[in-house]
Image: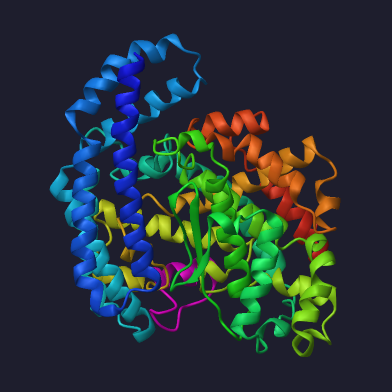
Amino acid sequence: MEQQLQELKQRLAEVFDLQMVGALLSWDQSTYMPSGGAEARGRQMATIGRLTHQKATAEEIGALLEDLQPYAESLEADADDAALIRVARRTYEQQVRIPEALVGEMLEHSAASYDAWTRARPANDFAAVRPLLERTLDLSRQIANCFPGYQHIADPLIDMSDYGMRAESVRAIFAQLRSELVPLVQAITAQTPANDVCLHRHYPAEQQRAFGEQIIRAFGYDFSRGRQDLTHHPFMTKFSLGDVRITTRYNEHDLSDGLFSTLHESGHAMYEQGINRSFEGTPLANGTSAGVHESQSRLWENLVGRSLGMWEFYYPQLQAAFPTQLADTSLDTFYRAINKVQRSLIRTDSDEVTYNLHVMIRFDLELAMLEGSLEVKDLPEAWNTRYREDLGITPPNDSNGVLQDVHWFGGPIGGVFQGYTLGNILSAQFFAAACAAHPTIEAEISQGQFGTLHSWLQQQIYVHGSKFTTDELVRRATGGPLDIGPYMTYLRKKYGAMYQIG
């Protein structure tokens, strides 16, 4: 078996390398590539995608996995080799169903769609991307239909990002969470909103960058294995476990935009940097799922980054960095400003309490598009109606409405947005488990020390990569399944104290 296992690892390493080349092309397109390169870049990404798919679905890999199955079954379930064979088999069986031509077509189309979106959003021009979005929807349905037997057409797409989840299970979680969130949103927004004027003074971008990088270095983001660059819509990417990069954007009249996107993406990156280095070049060298990955970005952005304890330590340093902007602003005013709850238009800028309502709107709309009950031409109106009904606010234009998120314009429709809310739920569940294991964590955060928390996350989550399913990982780390309880307890405690509500 050893010879066959080594051959499997060698073939998987070739697939991994090609995937990382594709990621590098995508990162460059989103950061430094001149607009004139868009057409060629789409072709290049499609070529790499087809080559990757050829390697990933080679009959030789299927035969090796079949031969190695008895060996995997002879090992303990949590043995690295058993996990590698299990995850590689699951990935192979998924990828072999999708035709190579469809993979290439989706990649080339997505590159063109993304390029068009970067111009359409600032121009408030939905008409420019509508035909591209219609094509994206068609291609997304084609991918889903490669997996017959689903209950809902979105199920295969959701499964690719959050293995084991289905549209029905996500809807059930969302319904339970929504019933808890709506009364809390109503109670808070009935009061006078926090004053956040202090966040909207002039904050030079370079000083914002320096301060944000100072914090994420303290969190544990390793700049010897990463870097930060500018983009339209912040993201994390990796080219190896030794090269995990983040991007951000700065608004010189909104301190929170660049700061919290930096903290958010560092959470994603620390996860990838913490994966067992022996997994390099295999399907285990990835995060478990979109939901678990998002749990790490939201944990560091919100449960740490928006905590009073962290700013008890960092606020004097922030005032020193921006003395004219913050000299007249107390810690309490600043803390309330960065945690302001309001009915808002932009998901990425929304507060912790309303954020999931934004996600639920997108999830429902993409399911309707995939089902065929909502046409792309009617999407802006449907978007505005849902915002009016759910958040009591109507987008003044498509730039701040249906065009605001890159996801539908840079990849398939379906399978992404649910991960954001699953991540929020898990962020509180993981943090509660970490604090139960190490009761000093919150006190350490107030002293600018994050090592104990980072170490617990490293041992319980990061190091495992995708060795375990989401359910297995959550049970190992917290002692139980995914549970909205810790998340709602966290929100009620934090915002109950801020707004004096029970």
- 447 in magenta: no
The magenta segment is: 383-401
Q: Residue at x 44, y 78 (%)?
A: 400
Query: Could you say where residue 488 lies in the image, as x and y percent from the top left?
Result: 68, 49
Would residue 258 be found to the left or right of residue 450 on screen? left
Query: Could you say where residue 264 lies in the image, as x and y percent from the top left?
Result: 59, 60
Q: Is residue 484 above or below residue 437?
A: below
The N terminus - image quarter: top left
Query: Could you say where residue 58 lies in the image, as x and y percent from the top left?
Result: 19, 33
- 392 in magenta: yes
Q: Residue at x 60, y 38 (%)?
A: 461
**Number of disc labels:** 0
Camera-side residue: 62 or 372? 62
Residue 94 visible, this angle:
yes
Would residue 63 be found to the left or right of residue 157 on screen? left
Query: Could you say where residue 52 lies in the image, as x and y percent from the top left?
Result: 24, 45
Image quadrant assignment for residue 3: top left
Q: Is residue 278 above or below residue 369?
A: above
Q: Residue at x 34, y 21 (%)?
A: 5
Camera-side residue: 7 or 335? 7
Camera-side residue: 297 or 224? 224
Image quadrant assignment for residue 67: top left
Q: Is residue 436 above or below residue 319?
A: above
Camera-side residue: 374 or 302? 302
